[in-house]
Image (cartoon, coloured by chain):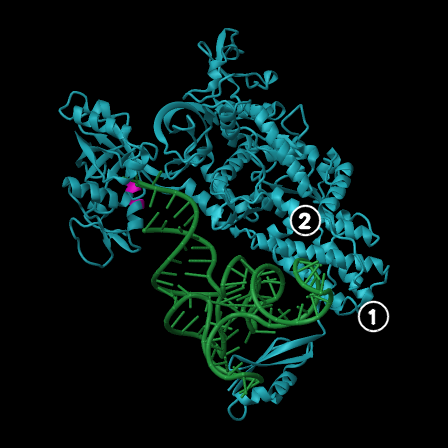
Amino acid sequence: MEQTDTEKYEPAAVEAKWQAVWAAEGAFTVANPTPAAAAADEGRSTYVLEMLPYPSGELHMGHVFNYTLGDVFTHVRRRQGFDVLRPMGYDAFGLNAENAAINEGGHPREITARNIEAIRRQMQRMGWAIDWSRELSTAEPEYYRWTQWLFLRFFERDLAYRREAPVKWCPKDQTVLANEQVIDGRCERCGTEVEARSLTQWFFKITDYADQLLDEMETLESWPDRVLTMQRNWIGRSEGARVTFTVEGSGEQLPVFTTRPDTLFGATFFVLAPEHPLIGALTAGSEHEAEVADYVRHTAARSAVERETKEKDGVFTGRHAVNPVNGEAIPIWVADYVLMEYGTGAIMAVPAHDERDHAFAERYGIEIRQVVAPAGGEGVDSGAYVAHTDNEVLVNSGEFSGLSAPDGKRAIVDWLAERGLGEATIGYRLRDWLLSRQRYWGCPIPVVHCDDCGIVAVPEDQLPVLLPEIDDYLPKGRSPLAAAEDWVATTCPACDGPARRETDTMDTFVDSSWYFLRYADARNDEAAWNQQIVDYWLPVKQYIGGIEHAVLHLLYARFFTKALNDMELLGFREPFSRLFTQGMIYRNGAKMSKSKGNVVSPDEAVAKYGADALRLYILYMGPAEQDKEWSDAGIEGTARLLDRVWRLALEVAARGPVDAPSDGELVRASHRTIARVSDDVLRRFQFHTPIAALFELVNEIYRVKDDPERAGEVRFATETVLSLVQPYAPHVAEELWSRLGHERLWEAVWPEADPALVATDTVEVVVQVNGKLRDRLRVAAGTPEETLVELALASERVRAHLDDGEPRRTVVVPDRLVNLVG
RNA sequence: GCCGAAGUGGCGGAACUGGCAGACGCUGCGGAUUCAAAAUCCGCUGUCCGUGAGGGCGUGUGGGUUCGAGUCCCACCUUCGGCACCA
């Protein structure tokens, strides 16, 4: 290269210049279709979405990764001619802002607004191709008005309801949590061990959709298996039977759920959960009453973790339950290894075939009776625990003895069903979604409580129910809204009598369960959305976000979409056709966090290397779905690449225009790179290998760029580099594109590889002897097999390894390899 | 315990359909340029033996299938993630 002073690459200036151009033009804004276009829907629309950020503090590298990934995909799709909807917003309600307000003073609204402003500035500084005209914040009345409207749609169909139930309570955050927000017995947000409480709370009836949430997974185009597995585990469907036992003496019915009705003859005791409502009545006035009550009290005081880890214990109630299949009366115990929330809160205990029941029976000396045995195997070993195997028959089971376990299951259930004593049924692990929270910074639940009319929905024309101004956000175990007496006291919309507003707010996951719908019609102030428009854009064609939402947001959003489809508000049943879950960014082996002091701020990296180099590096680090380790040295590699491209393009520009030749080594290398980049991004959804391909092409250009005979090829290859790097590094690509005399690369058609030029005319064929590499041949592509074998046999090196004479066998893969087997 | 994913140089990783293991980047080493340095450019960089040409070994471990295995099969080890008194 000439040693003249070439203009230095200054990322900050280049990036500011093009960001201003794109902002002024609204370059990435897409219009909604006219009704006619929406009806025709010609498939030119596509929706690329990343999970919206929670505006606590600033963006971190995880965000940079997530949104850059979506950005590359967006650019490529746009340049392929698609109308790409790529919006952005903020999940603005929630405890972070509220806790910050408590700790630092100020209003959560102001803190949130400040954070949103900082994040928006960072996003614009990264140069992401976002349609800013659809920006939304879930904490704005223009948005939460419709969250409330949707809540009322669920309420009027009994999909939102209030009841008293055992719930998980976080003593630190002073609020209840959904089951999905409890991880290993701890609060998902703050890590505090949760407590059990019995409270009246609002729930969404997500359990009504358990089967659909499972079955309709089939209709998804592409979701990671692990996410589907996690959802399947979470829903926890298991087939079994409901069997009715009766209390001896009183005849009261005690239904149980079991997945092993074939073991019914082996039930030797019966267990109630300590929370079971019948316990009081069963023991009242008996000598066991005090002991049982004492046990129940102790259980209530135990933490969930303690309850799970201690040895199994329980107390006898003094009463017996009658087994419907054999009329046998078995003792009823109370034990905390039985959970009130699952099944019926009562179990038939079969110690020979259930490990937990076995442990319990051993401890209390209860009979252990084997009722299934391996077919044709050993006899009956009284007292042992017999694990389930594939090929079993019933024993000691009256008329059912001798049947295989599956047949026995069916026969016993049929026998029970005929007599009204039981039926086949299905159990789920999934519980209803607890949506109410005893905190300030959330969406108010739009109902009032009236002494005469009960719970009454706030009429639509009175929405939104605005969050009142209060002075004290401190959580007190009840909603801080309750202190706003002027706001709480209202009139009943039904009878005009005095009424009180609901003071709980909604879980922020309610806000994020429909934001992707609102983006499609974000400025509609007459409805949550126009269905025709939403149906035009959705379902989301490519959704990108973290795996941590596998059973939270991703399950809730699916539930909302199905329920809204049943309400005929949407024309589809799954919100996200394709899902990609990206890995997390680590540094020094740990997740970046302020407390560990290992945070690299995107702002620092941008200031030092520019947004383009950061965008390239964050995607070059490794496979997008894997966790990755940040390296300061690594980003210098991509910064260097851009610097090389910069100097190359300026040099090419200085030489003036030259026509591209129709063929040549660099032309072919360019076409191969086009093919690789397109295939990786579009078919494989792989973003790091295209960058390696670009490195290779740039290296190749550098090797020959000073050859005057190759000027045309060099120019073509350089322009190809700019075109292909544009989705990754849009600013510098755009600048150099204009220096080369072109315009508007962000709108240029995505290049297509010419298959004729992708193929090479000469190939290297590997020669192996007994599978070991011994020589390489450079031959014309398509050289016939016999010729290849002849050439291979002519090789000195090959002959040296073919001990003597001819190979016994030859294997030829045309254009690739010859293997001579001696 | 159950379910799932992953183990490749000093490091991040590539190898898509069973066919050249280690592309590309980082690090390190050497050279050019420079008064000198930075930057830049060129080269080398799995490991062992060998002055060299060359050869042996090598994708968590052990076996298997195959002309040929990082890739397929069986068993095991390790790490990570999810679920877990769910009857």
Circle 1 is placed at which residue position?
A709
- In the rendered image, residue A770, in percent from the top left (x then y), is placed at 51, 82
* Residue A385 x/y as whole percent: 21, 49
The answer to whether residue A68 is above or below residue A622 is: above
Residue under pointer 2: A612
Which badge, 1 or 2, comes first in the chain's sequence? Answer: 2
- Disc number at residue A213? none
* Image position, residue A293 (x, y; %): 21, 25
Instruction: Identify whether A303 is placed above or below A488.
Output: below
Whether residue A503 is visible, yes or no, is: no
Give the letter of the chain under mark 2.
A
Which percent across, then down, holds residue A698?
A: 71, 62
Amino acid type of the residue that numbered disc 1 sits on in the rendered structure: Glu
The chain that appears green in the image is B
Q: Secondary structure at mark 1?
A: helix
| Residue range highlighted in magenta | A410-415
Q: Colour of chain A?
A: cyan
